[in-house]
Image (cartoon, rainbow, N blue to C red):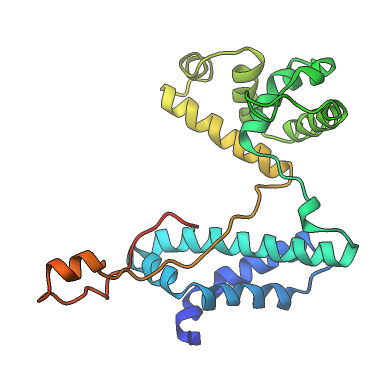
Amino acid sequence: MDWNRIEPWDYIVVGVASEYHRKYDMVELDDIKQSLYQWFLEHPNKLDEWEAIGHKDAKNLIYRSLRNQALDYCQKWKAKTVGYETSDLFYYESDMVEALLPAVLRGEFGISHKLNLTGPSRPPAPAEGGNMMAMMVEVDAAYEKLSIEDRTVLFYKYAESLDYGAIAAEMKLGSEDAARMRHNRAIRKLVIRLGGFKPFSDRDVQKSTQSQEQVESEPDSSPDSDNGERTNED
């Protein structure tokens, strides 16, 4: 891929590289940039697809993928520098945070041994009690750093067990959907305060080709090789 394809998005590369250089100052800024330029080289089809749907949407999707690329690169570099395996990193998931919030916001730290964060089909390991206590403390500290609005919607939801209709009425949000969206944004901000989401596997999309069945049933038709197949992989 030539520079002309990358240049329109270089401002995103610079912004994301600067953001993660501040968070991981042990990683050189130019090294982070190079890892982001590498993303464009490895995802030409995805870039074609995203640019085709419009500049605004492409900007948002590219920004998200580059932040993920930077996070993955910086975490690997930090692990190599400090001397631990990236597999040792722990990430909070939204459902895990939501499972912890009722006890955290009600101050029920003594019931951590009763919480099951591994799903209904598998009980927690006996050794997880102490870890859960530490997790609850971390969630509590991250919660206190949220805005008043975010803390309020989470308190109503998890400490007082209000439904979205009641939350909307209490916060004058206008509708259940508005309350649900406010809640989802607050949960996302809380996870980010706790260190962020786990980097996802970002693979390039494949150009679509006709299936063998189509070729056999339509021997006179030519393959439509110019259309990219939309996927949800990010």
Give the residue drawn at x 64%, y 40%: 189
Examine the image and state in which quarter residue 70 appears: bottom right
Q: Is residue 159 above or below residue 139?
A: above
Residue 130, given in percent of the width and then of the height, sits at 88, 28
Give the residue drawn at x 68%, y 47%: 196
Q: Is residue 44 left or right of residue 162?
A: left
Residue 177, given in percent of the width and then of the height, sits at 42, 27
Q: Name the one closer to the observer, 225 or 73.
A: 225
Q: Name the one closer to the observer, 76 or 123.
A: 123
Give the residue drawn at x 72%, y 76%: 31
Residue 80, given in percent of the width and then of the height, sits at 84, 66
Examine the image and state in which quarter residue 213 appears: bottom left
Q: Is residue 2 above or below residue 175?
A: below
Q: Is residue 115 above or below residue 201?
A: above
Q: Name the one closer to the observer, 57 or 96.
A: 96
Q: Is residue 99 left or right of residue 89?
A: left
Q: How many marks?
A: 0
Examine the image and state in which quarter residue 160 appears: top right
Give the residue drawn at x 78%, y 29%: 140
Residue at far bottom of view: 2
Residue 28, given in percent of the width and then of the height, sits at 78, 74
Q: Name the one closer to the observer, 123 or 157.
A: 123
